[in-house]
Amino acid sequence: MGEGPSSKRIALHAATLGGRRVDYASALNEEQRQVVMHPGGPMLVLAGAGSGKTRTVVYRVARLLEDGVDASSILLLTFTNRAARDMLQRVETLLGRDASRIMGGTFHSVGNRLLRRFGTRLGYADSYGILDREDARDLMAAALAEEVPHAPERRLPGAAALVEVYSYVVNTGRPLPQVLAARFPQFAGETQVIENVFRRYLERKRRANVMDYDDLLLNWLLLLRHQPEVRLLLATRFQHILVDEYQDTNRLQADIVDSMLGGGRNLLVVGDDAQSIYAFRGAEYANILSFPERYPDCTTFRLETNYRSLPPILDLANASIACNEKQFRKTLRPVREGGELPALVAAPTPETQAAFVAQQVLELLDQGVPLPEIAVLYRNHSHSLELEVELTRRNIPYEVRSGLRFFEQRHVKDVLAHLRFVANPRDEVAFTRMARLRPRLGQRLVARIWSALLQGSEPLRALHRLDGRALGLPPAAARSLQQLAELVQRLEALVARPGEMVREVLASGYRDWVRSQFDNAPSRLDDLEQLALFADGYDTLAAFLDEVTLMNELSGEDVTAEPGEREAMTLSTVHQAKGLEWRVVFVVWLAEGRFPTARAEDLEEERRLFYVACTRAKDELYLCYPLICRDRYRLDIITEPSRFVSELPESTYQRWLLEEGAAEEEPAALAPGSYRLPGFLPDPDSN
């Protein structure tokens, strides 16, 4: 039903008489109720993990509607459209009436709706198109080709990296030289070229009447700053603004919110500074910390009652986050009772760590814990490598929430293509993938080269003898072919050391290629170093590739299902796990240099990441690290436990020390001759 004047009078009358439909006193705890019933003005809600944050926002909206606030004057900003839909559906269920007139959604979706109406003020037709990330990369590539039409003398960032730089500059408001120095130092000397590319990119978007995702925010702010009548109209319309996950907003989003406020200044921001972990995306931790300074008259609320985790898990999490200096102090208090101390598990090696997790998962299954209620969390995706191998060996189903499984990632497959070609010189797929990574070798030229290699019986020798100029290749392509042949020759000399083969590929240009092409280059390079260390455990190239090939039979799918939709445990980076929960959580590779990472610039954010990992667990928490790992020279080095573990009071955990092989379980032996040949196979004894 719509909310006309008569229904508004009825709602106001009901509120006056105290005759609300919702029983707020019994539905909420005291902390939540204070937020829901507060009259208005600037409000900062510090919502600890598992404290019923979403419930509080839902009941706040319901209370506003019951007290006669017009639904169309409420703006609800969330970080996923699904979150907004779920909240508004819950409001409708509570009140038994339509809440669709509330404007709710992500910053980008709300910005799009407003720009559809007011974008003409900025020179856009109301039929403008929206570029997704792939479209944006294509347009950025065209702008780059226009600015640098010939092969540059120096390596420049690729389109994907340029889109990432552009987005970071727009969302944070930081100068391009500063962003390059901090995130892409290898391109710090190319500021002018990159600025020119960005100008061409902007011109192309204008000509095409399109916006990218970042424009939806930037143009929204430009409307508020440069169109006073639009700002007044919006500030008058939206009398109540609610922002979820405020700790994850960037500077641009915070300025939009501040500029949207009307005379009543009814702004409620909800978040947890202890869970601010997205600085790498441009999230501005200072937004939530400085909120009381920007709004001196704000009322601050704390939601500290935790409904998720058992007391020992919260004791450990509270002790950890207390070590941070820059924060709003809070202590999570459990509703649930009982529970065992979290286990601090020291494993002899990374392989033993993986075997322990796998064996523990099997025991949990025997105890009735379903696989979807079990998760393994790690700092970087490369930390899943040994575990993926072990789970596959034991036939334990898993899904990877941090993207593709390890061996199916593009950069891993690129490097492996070099090794596969050396192992099997007739592997056309491997050769094509390897060759296409070299400058000036496009698809048609690579096909011509491959045809020439197949003329002889030994493609490897043919590659070393092949003359690119005689084959009709342009000079630049001929040089690339020669460099490729030289690289393959060096790899042939290393076949007994597959780890060194991986490092040789990296040193021969692929490391620079990753840095220029990918927005998350440091993480991908970490993956490849981990791949090299993993390969060090094999004495032959054939043995290593056999292991990888068998892994690939069971991998290579993106995770599209929601947690728990299929019978599989979860492997995830901590970043991808935020907002989720499981009965049992393993946090692995809690060693210095791994978690926190060796290149961590903000240790307090790293500690917040550890805090987020721990507070995903409801019933059981295992903190794992290897005592020894192998370096690139095949030397065993002693690892230090993460400082986030070392600084914990010993009363907050129980210490487990595994012995080598303690977590191993030999498969049961089968009776000889128990396998029967399928009927469609010919009987070898019949001849």
Image (cartoon, rainbow, N blue to C red):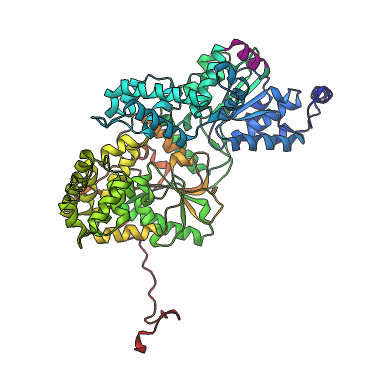
The stretch drawn in magenta includes residue 235: yes
Q: Nearer the viewer, residue 340 or 209?
A: 209
Which residue in the rendered view is the most extreme toward the bottom? 686
Q: Residue at x 42, y 81 (%)?
A: 676
Say which of 441 and 154 sits in front. 441
Toward which corner of the image does residue 150 lie, by quadrant?
A: top left
Magenta part mainly helix, strand or loop? helix
Q: Is residue 126 left or right of residue 612?
A: right
Task: Give how far across and how far down residue 37 sits, in percent.
Answer: 69, 25
User: Can you say which quadrant of the picture contains the C terminus?
Assistant: bottom left
Residue 554 on image: x %, y %: 42, 58
Identify whether 414 is placed above or below 80: below
Left or right: 68 with respect to 597? right
Nearest the camera: 336 or 497? 497
Locate the N terminus and report the quarter of the image it occupies.
top right
In this image, 251 relative to 627: left or right?
A: right
> Any magenta on residue 560?
no
x then y, percent, for residue 58: 66, 32
Query: For the image shown, how many numbered marks are present on the structure?
Result: 0
Magenta residue span: 227-236
State whether residue 164 appears in this view.
Answer: no
**Residue 460 visible somewhere in the drawing:** yes
Residue 241 figure quarter: top right
Which residue of the protein is positioned furthest toward the top in this rendering?
A: 228
Residue 538 x/y as whole percent: 24, 58
| Residue in the picture at 17% in, 53% down | 494
